[in-house]
Image: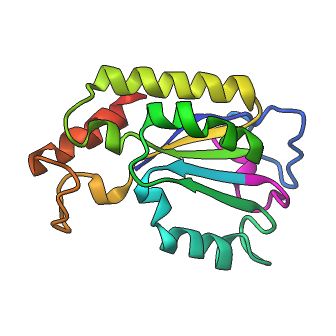
Amino acid sequence: GTRLLTSAYDSEDVTPEVPVDPTEPLARWKSGNSVAGKRVTFLGDSTTAIAPGIFDTLRLQITAPGGEWEGAVVTQLGYNGQTIDGFLGQSFQELVATNPALIVVCLGLNNVRLGMYSREDVRALLDELIVRIQDQIPLADIVLWTPNSMLSVDAAGMNTVLPVSSAQDYTDRVWNAH
């Protein structure tokens, strides 16, 4: 699932080509508004690092000539085993350097998949990440994204969430964190 956290639509650098409701989440990313040259950064763990279908679609269709986000630049900051606290400590400045207009956060799986972090822990870490993003990249829109492969069961039998019965709990922790 995907959840909008914040939208910086009212920022000075946004000039929509078609009228939009500025209170509508992600209004500047709607079809008909030029996002050419805007940077979209996906940050996450292995579910982001090994998501070629998503990035192929973005590159070949969505950001390509005639696509809804024609001319947008997509950066993928997904690292196998990445946690929210690990990202804050090791990779945050890499995110800042991309200067994104849209940040898609897909972090938290490795924080909770083995049952080591509570919902409160995940919320506190996401809060810290969001505060730092808003401080360092104040005009960026932020979307929290839960990888669909982890929504309720270990359908692929890969034992990525242990015990497997924790898969729904993982989703609930990340989804309900914000």
The single residue placed furthest to the front in the displayed view is 90
The residue located at (45%, 30%) in the rendering is 85
Residue 132: % across, % down? 63, 24
- Residue 7 falls inside the magenta stretch: no
The residue located at (86%, 42%) in the rendering is 14
Taking depth in this image into account, of 42 and 29 the one nearest to the observer is 42
Residue 105: % across, % down? 52, 44
Height in image: 95 above or below 71?
Answer: above
* Highlighted magenta segment, given as a residue range: 25-39
Residue 172 makes an appearance in the image: yes
The answer to whether 89 appears left or right of 24 in the picture is left
Residue 141: % across, % down? 67, 39
Taking depth in this image into account, of 83 and 4 the one nearest to the observer is 83
Residue 94: % across, % down? 68, 43
The answer to whether 87 appears left or right of 97 in the picture is left
> Where, quadrant-wise, is the C terminus in this rendering?
top left
- Residue 26 falls inside the magenta stretch: yes
The answer to whether 46 appears left or right of 78 in the picture is left
Height in image: 78 above or below 134?
Answer: below
Q: Quadrant of residue 69?
A: bottom right
Q: Quadrant of residue 35?
A: bottom right
The residue located at (63%, 44%) in the rendering is 103
The answer to whether 1 appears left or right of 37 in the picture is left
Height in image: 118 above or below 96?
Answer: above
Residue 100 makes an appearance in the image: no
The residue located at (17%, 58%) in the rendering is 159
Q: Main secondary structure of the magenta part?
A: loop
